[in-house]
Amino acid sequence: MMLEPARQLYRRKLQEFLAIARRAERPLLTMHNDPDPDAMGAAVGLQHLLRQRLRKESAIAFSGIIGRAENKAMVQELGLELLQLSSLPLAQFDFIVLVDAQPGAGNQPLPPELKPHAVVDHHRLRPETQSCPFWDVRGNVGATSTIVASYLRAAGVRLPPNVATALFYGIKADTLGLARGAGADDVQAYIYLQRCLDAAKLARIEGASVSPEYFRALDQALHRTSMLDGLVVARLGEMRYPDMAAEVADMLRRLEGSKVVLAIGHYAGEVIISLRSSALDLALDELLQKAIRTDGTAGGHGLMAAGRVPATLAGAADDTEREIVRRFAALLGVDVHRARPLLREE
Ligand SMILES: [Mn+2]
């Protein structure tokens, strides 16, 4: 019987991954800084794969913080054991896997001289990745969790509800419920995982409660949002956690007439930029790289991108935010000085 090409590819990559991982004694799974549900889902899925197929226990470690209420709830509800990378002696691990990020990217947590042994990701393929012993980078897939779920499916391992829920929520969050950048593989994985997940836990994760400060921060963000010619800019100022920018950008995507959303704020000495678009003809990651130049780091893909620069780049953090907004707007040919505020002050 002929296998469909996508399945065959997953099967081949799975065998390749297992062949390399088989030699490992101490595997470490890591993901991009300030990990999101897709990164955590992919790491948990690979941890399960290593345990079930190779009887190997692995650690999962990250840098940064888990700030968003849903992401904290995911860790708690699913009992994820995540370690701080800085607390680990990296030299003791002989097999390092990087998921949902790639070596050379600004948001990856490993020291530059340390190349991971394996990379699984769905962002634009970076040249550094191609010299890793194993890599599976698929820009046409909506979530890294989709790739990992497809390995698990090809491996025929049983999925406990917590692992299935982590992978499912990873895909759901990254693709906005299959509505953004999702393809046939994402749909297949979604259906496959749906049968095994814990619906009550998923509901508690997605409905995680937030503090009054969250709404205050949101109020401030909306009062500092302006729009012109389809470009929506939200200036968040000091943020309570770094992925607040992504959260606000996701929310503003739905604003009528918006083509590109830029949410920008600062956290721990860095200005953090998050971009969203529904226009398929814009390569947001490339645009952001042009705006950031060599002053910081950027990554992502066509419909979503993120970057960071030192907060002191143009003086105070506020000046740096303004400078990045100015550069980005100039690339789109938008004169930000003519932008109108979203809300009127009373
Ligand atoms: Mn992802």
Image (cartoon, rainbow, N blue to C red):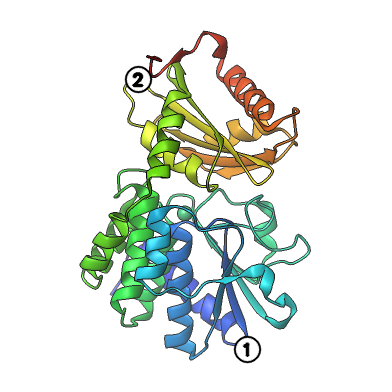
Residue 178 % position (x, y): 30, 49
Residue 320 % position (x, y): 68, 29
Location of the N terminus (image quadrant):
bottom left
The residue depicted at 41 percent of the width and 15 percent of the height is 345
Q: Nearer the viewer, residue 216 or 287?
A: 216
| C-alpha span from label 1 to label 2 | 54 Å
Q: Nearer the viewer, mark 1 or mark 2?
A: 2
The residue depicted at 56 percent of the width and 41 percent of the height is 306
Residue 68 % position (x, y): 44, 52
Task: Report whether the residue tagged 2 is closer than 8 Å to ligand 1.
Answer: no
Residue 143 shows in the view: yes
Left or right: 261 as drawn, with respect to 257:
right
Left or right: 15 as drawn, with respect to 152:
right
Say which mark, if any, is on residue 73: none
**Label 1 CA crowd tier, 10 Å (few <14, some 14–19, many 20+):** some
Q: Quadrant of residue 162?
A: bottom left
Q: Which residue is mark 2?
A: 257
Q: Which residue is mark 1?
A: 25
Q: Nearer the viewer, residue 329 or 248?
A: 248
Residue 278 % position (x, y): 39, 32
- Relative vertical location of residue 54 with respect to residue 311 in this rendering, above or below: below
Q: Amino acid at mark 2?
A: Gly
In this view, which residue lies farthest toward the top? 338
